[in-house]
Amino acid sequence: MDLYFLLLAFILGTIIGSFLNVVVFRYNTGMGLGGRSRCMSCARNLTWIELVPVFSFLSQKGTCRKCKTKISWQYPLVEFLAGVLFVLIFFAFPPVTLITGIITLVQLVVASILMVIVVYDIKHKIIPDLLVYIFAAIAFIHLFIFQTPALIDVLAGPLLALPFALLWLVSKGRWMGLGDAKIMLGIGWMVGFASGISAVFLAFWIGAAVSVAWMLIAFRKVKGHYEIPFAPYLVLGMYIVLLFGVSVIDIRPFLGILGS
Ligand SMILES: [Zn+2]
């Protein structure tokens, strides 16, 4: 795929990322998605030059042009990551025919929803119900795009969500939120059962490594109940598997025993 096209994909991603920041900020606040973006400090309407993704943050050195209030790193970071994710999706799911084009579009929509879920989970330690159900619904429907899915692909969602739901039930929500089970439903339907297991393993390993690193760097005792948002790791695990074809565990012998 030529470089020019991937650059366009990146720019598209940063523009969508900019919109996703607005969704995260306004979700559940009753503000709606219409209306101009304003500086959160001086309430001044932003001009178009201040709305250019990533670039405006860098050129203004991370502050409001008028009142000089610091702007959160979340904004350029989400824009940049959305740009990178869009490039990787166009690379892994190139729109060549009508069918592959529909799949590209579905992947971009799913990526956008998942980015909002991840940023919202990091900020508020909760996975928005409506968004995670929309994600699961799209993931389920996507199985049927111009094909009849295998039974294992249809069962992948519930099979991968079940252990998380049990962890939630047994721990009364202390180890795992029910939102993690809901997101696994969609991840299972997006990548299938075998890859879904790889995604979960990757999520636990990366999550554990980051937590240990964080405790060592921060060098502090974790006070009382410390909640680690887990959805970001599950989504990261899913994309490592989906975009790079990484497989960390081979379940084929196990499936052979089951006679499938
Ligand atoms: Zn301002």
Image (cartoon, rainbow, N blue to C red):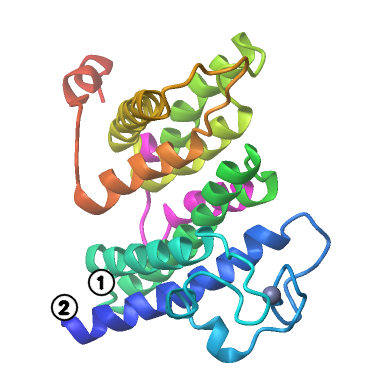
Q: Residue at x 45, y 68 (%)?
A: 79
Furthest residue in direction right, as rendered: 30
Indicate yes or no whether the magenta region holds residue 144.
yes
Q: Nearer the viewer, residue 178 or 82?
A: 82
Say above or below: 257 vs 232: above
Does residue 81 appear anywhere in the picture? yes
Q: Nearer the viewer, residue 145 or 242?
A: 242
Q: How many marks?
A: 2
Residue 140 x/y as whole percent:
50, 49
The range drawn in magenta is: 132-153
Residue named by callout 1: 94
Residue 112 x/y as whole percent:
50, 62
**Can you tell which mark lies on residue 1?**
2
**Magenta: main secondary structure:** helix
Does mark 1's beta carbon lie closer than 8 Å to ligand 1? no
Which quadrant of the view contains residue 168? top right
Q: Residue at x 41, y 65 (%)?
A: 82
Q: Residue at x 61, y 11 (%)?
A: 171
Q: Are marks 2 and 1 in contact (CB under 8 Å)?
A: yes
* Element carrying mark 2: loop
**Cα gap from disc 2 to disc 1, whole angstroms:** 8 Å
Q: Nearer the viewer, residue 97 or 171?
A: 171
